[in-house]
Image (cartoon, grey):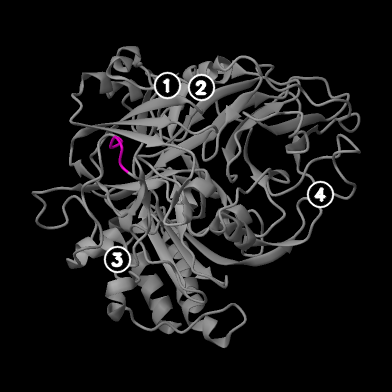
Amino acid sequence: MRRLLALVAALLALRPALATDPYAFFDWDVSYVTAAPLGVKQQVIGINGKFPGPVVNITTNWNVVVNVLNDLDEPLLITWNGIQHRKNCWQDGVLGTNCPIPSGWNWTYEFQVKDQIGSFFYFPSTGLQRAAGGFGGIVVNNRDVIAVPFGRPDGDITILIGDWYNKNHTDLRKMLDKGKDLGMPDGVLINGKGPYRYNDSLVPAGIEYETFNVHPGRTYRIRVHNVGTSTSLNFRIQGHNMLLVETEGSYTTQQNYTNLDVHVGQSYSFLVTTDQNASSDYYIVASARQVNESLWRRVTGVAVLRYSNSGGPASGPLPDPPQDRDDRTFSMNQARSVRWNLSAGAARPNPQGSFRYSAINVTQAYLLRSTAPVSIGGRRRATLNGLSYAPPETPLRLADAYGVEGVYTLDFPERPPPGAAPRIARSIINGTYRGFMELIFQNNDTRMQSYHMDGYAFFVVGMDYGEWTEDSRGTYNKGDGVARSTIQVYPGAWAAVLVSLDNVGIWNVRSENLDSWYLGQEVYVRVVNPEDTGNKTEMAIPGNALYCGQLHKYQKEQTPHHKMGVSAAAPRSSFAARRLVSAALLLAGSFVLAP
């Protein structure tokens, strides 16, 4: 402790020299907790005993340090959906770049939210664990010196919506391993809670529901994330307009919606003004889309918006979803209406629209076709271009760093090979550093899919029903296609995105539908600077890297640090010391945060 106090004193003495980007420290114990969100007791994944996990509230350019203790009975990785990890795929938290954290071990993520703002979320990325929880919101605020294209809201609310099964994620895995579909989910949760009892026959008594308390005459920023397993959801607030202002790190043109489809893995933020009368509470609804709604009535999440002067509880029928059962174009046209705000700044003062993507020549183009699951070697698998990805024991990026050969191949096909039998492979895309890549997602399945790319935001330039052809480029939005990291692809349709490959690393492109992802519907894009001679364009491998597979011999033993064990004292004391130093730096005026 004396040494720590001496260090703090030294830091205080150096305060003029310590002005740097702030640090935010988080200490997470990831463990099972018992919950009954739909009235059935089950094990869910909590963080520090809470389900869902905490909201990470930070500001652009901050350095984020998250110490994760894995108190589950299986390996764990946390990924940060939409956080770009500039030059640092080592912190991505997927099996292509990281060895999973063994049960009882801890690992510390450390990354900078460089030049990013907006609404994102985190979740456990392996073994269908997101279907059990472990997720939470991420808010990346603008710096005070950067103008925001709307007035300062009176409050900021994070809403996590998603379909939910009463079966544990381990049972869901067994179903998929046996070749079965997961089937209809048991309900939809809002912030980890079940539906308000709007209908006595559909919602049993005793279900805990979420209430959002607001004051009349104010404006709130509401961030909505679909953290579910595989169900697209329509989000709406009874009697209130929702002014869309941002999605996944990009400010959008400001448009009012009475409802909006939020597909798996997507994030949006709205401004909602509490300008209605307060005779009663109002429903907040998330209901299943692209399904037979009469069969899926119980798969509806309902929360309550309560004014501080409310006259009573919400009652009566829920606000209607879009009446488009016979109109396949409604949802797609709604998706096309989400456009980039070309005059707004973001993490930097220059306008978003100063990046004129239509003036850049495409250097690589890949058409990624998905189909319904197929049988490969007697096992049910999902594919892209006929290839079903199987993670190797040695992560791809780690294999590159140590020169381990034979872990993967760089021969992923640019187009679906005609007549080729589907197969399991570890084939990845060889991206060209500083190239401009076109990715076309062709969904030949009968259900909605969402696709996400780690490490990047891409420009959504086109989507339509039918098969993509070369002529489809003539329909692309060449001016204000929004930049985001997750795109929905309608059944029997395609979606095209453009991405500037300026972020070195090996980056995951995946189906956000957990069952498709688990069954192999993913690929990695390898981006290497051929002229890099000293980690100028990529961070070095972290000193705390975990080793597995062919590199397991490099792994140092770590005494398990289970929360009830005596050995937990050492690492937690060390982490607490770092937090104390950080707090001292904050007081010293170096703008270091230790929440």
Q: Main secondary structure of the magenta part?
A: loop
For marks 3 and 2, give the one nearer the viewer. Answer: 2
Q: In the rendered image, which residue does mark 4 sit on?
A: 208
- Is mark 2 in CB contact (under 8 Å) with mark 1? yes
Magenta-colored stretch includes residue 203: no
Q: Disc 4 or 2, which lies upstream in sequence? A: 4
Q: What element carries label 4?
A: loop
For marks 4 and 3, give the one nearer the viewer. Answer: 4
Q: In the rendered image, which residue does mark 3 sit on?
A: 542
Q: In this view, does 554 lie above or below 455?
A: below
Number of numbered tags placed on the structure image: 4
Q: Disc 3 or 2, which lies upstream in sequence? A: 2
Q: Disc 2 or 1, which lies upstream in sequence? A: 2
Q: Label 1 sits on what residue type?
A: Met
**Residue 192: x, y in percent?**
69, 49
Q: Label 2 sits on what residue type?
A: Ala
Give the residue at x 18% y 37%.
434
Q: Distance between the residues labelled 4 and 1?
A: 39 Å
- Is mark 3 in CB contact (under 8 Å) with mark 1? no
Q: In the rendered image, which residue does mark 1 sit on?
A: 463
Q: Label 3 sits on what residue type?
A: Pro
Q: Label 4 sits on what residue type?
A: Glu
Which segment did they paint magenta?
A: 416-420
Label 2 Cα crowd, 10 Å radius (few <14 / some 14-19 / many 20+): some
- Is mark 4 in CB contact (under 8 Å) with mark 2? no
Q: In the rendered image, which residue does mark 2 sit on?
A: 335
Q: Distance between the residues labelled 2 and 1?
A: 9 Å
Q: Is residue 70 above or below residue 492?
A: below
Residue 550 shown left or right of residue 534 in the figure: right
Q: How far apart are marks 4 and 2 (CA)?
A: 33 Å
Inspect this view and state whether residue 464 appears. yes
